[in-house]
Amino acid sequence: MRLHIKPETVDQANFIADAVMSPIADPKPDRTDNALARMGLDGYAPYLMNRIMGRYNATLRAEMARLGLSTAKMRALAILSVEDGLQIGELGVYAVVEQSTLSRALDGLVADGLARRETDATDQRVVRIHLTASGHATFDRLWPHMIAGHDRMFRGIDAAERQAFLATLRKILTNVRKHEF
């Protein structure tokens, strides 16, 4: 449907032309008052950390899928390969996974024979999570892919710079963490 407007004067014609030709909203609003825009995404550490970890996790997805692992399962296997016998809450903190998501992941690891739940010998209320031999073997198949992604992140970065970066990350973790570990 077309709208036909017949202006009666030149002023009306100019008004109609201006209304039709001018944009309703500025297509590129000025963002100079936005602190993030002034800082830039490359200057905003949470953005950079999320991008790095998103890329790292993406490089592992194919191998994780071959092994039947989700990101939560992979993180649990990796942590338990270093700190076996953690309580579920502790494992959730280390794995940076919500407890409900971790519980489902652990159910899957137990069902797949990769982990087992054990009641603590000194406190029957406490359940600890342990890797089985199959869990260790699965992690051993994943580890080369994990370390390759890790090494790719540090390509072109010398040892001193890497150690300084890791020290800075530890300080940041101390600043933001809620737990003593």
Image (spheres, grey):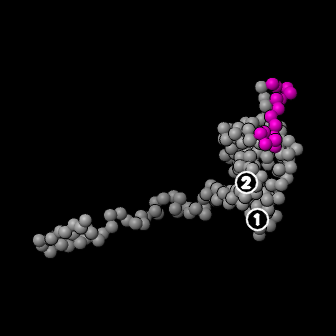
Quadrant housing the N terminus: bottom left
The residue that label 2 is drawn on is 65
Position of 17 compared to 118: left or right?
left
How far across and how far down the image is residue 20, in percent? 27, 69
In the rendered structure, which amino acid carries the disc numbered 1? Answer: Arg
**Is residue 46 within the magenta segment?**
no
Quadrant housing the C terminus: top right
The residue that label 1 is drawn on is 152
**Is residue 113 within the magenta segment?**
yes
| First to last magenta residue range | 110-124
How far across and how far down the image is residue 137, in percent? 86, 49
| Residue 127 appears in the rendering | yes
Q: What is the secondary structure assignment of the residue under circle 2?
A: helix
Position of 44 compared to 104: left or right?
left
The residue located at (37%, 65%) in the rendering is: 26
Q: What is the secondary structure assignment of the residue under circle 1?
A: helix
Quadrant hosting residue 17: bottom left
In the rendered structure, which amino acid carries the disc numbered 2? Answer: Ala
